[in-house]
Amino acid sequence: MTTPRALRRSIAILAVVSVVAACGGDDDGGGAGNGDGGDGGAAADTPIGRALTAEFMAESEDSPISTEEEARCVSGGIVSEIGEDRLAELGVTPESIADSDIEDVAFTAEEAGTIVDTMFDCVDVKAALATEFEADFGAEGAQCLADNLDEDLIRDLMASSFLGDETDEMPDDFFQSFLDIAAECDLPLD
């Protein structure tokens, strides 16, 4: 049975990659994967950008970031949008990346939103969700679920994980949406 805790874990895995990880932004949840984080191509080649890319690749088994192109896109987007100085102020440096815990970084709500936007810009988040849910619901059921989840709710959950708001309780509106989609997709919930 898929519990709210398991669902939260599945969503949270998209947001937390053990570093300062995430990407995000187009409206269809597609993920351009253009490798430059918008205008962040040069930012991915900075020391912090290279360290983030290396960490994303090291953690790729546990994250939605699966290619070097996606990792560079995310890294470049984070560095260009948040800035090297601000990341250093938050304690995120090339030397600290591998030892950092995302929950210990004091991002503002705006910065968390920027990271989530970068994730959606660089990675096909819905495909990553479908992959995550496949073990519980099979390929067809997982794809149906991922295609029908409200993107704004996914974004809010991802952003909340960057703000240290990781409770075991799912927001009522998300859980109700999940139950409605589960019924529509004929997912086994027992």
Image (tube, rainbow, N blue to C red):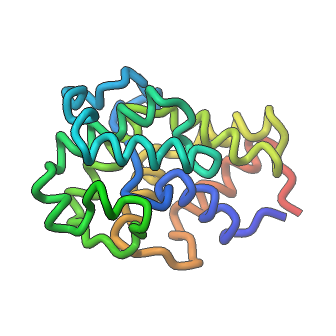
Which residue occupies 14% across, 67% down? 89
Write the residue at 43% across / 36% down: 71
Residue farthest front in this picture: 95
Q: Position of residue 28 (x, y in %)?
A: 43, 29
Residue 138 lies in quadrant: top right
Q: How many marks?
A: 0
Residue nearest the observer in this picture, 90 or 147 = 90
Give the residue at x 45% y 54%.
153
Residue 110 is left or right of residue 119, and the answer is left
Residue 6 in which image quadrant? bottom right
- Residue 97 lies, in percent from the top left, at 37, 59
In the rendered image of this protein, does residue 36 appear above or below residue 174? above
Q: Quadrant of residue 141?
A: top right
Q: Is 69 situated left or right of 174 in this image? A: left
Q: Which residue: 60% across, 39% down? A: 128
Is 90 displayed left or right of 128 in the figure? left
- Nearer to me, 135 or 83: 83
Q: Nearer the viewer, residue 107 or 2?
A: 107
- Expressed as whole percent of the image width and height from the top left, the position of residue 109 reads 23, 63
Coordinates of residue 133 in the picture (x, y in percent): 73, 47
Which image quarter holds the C terminus?
bottom right
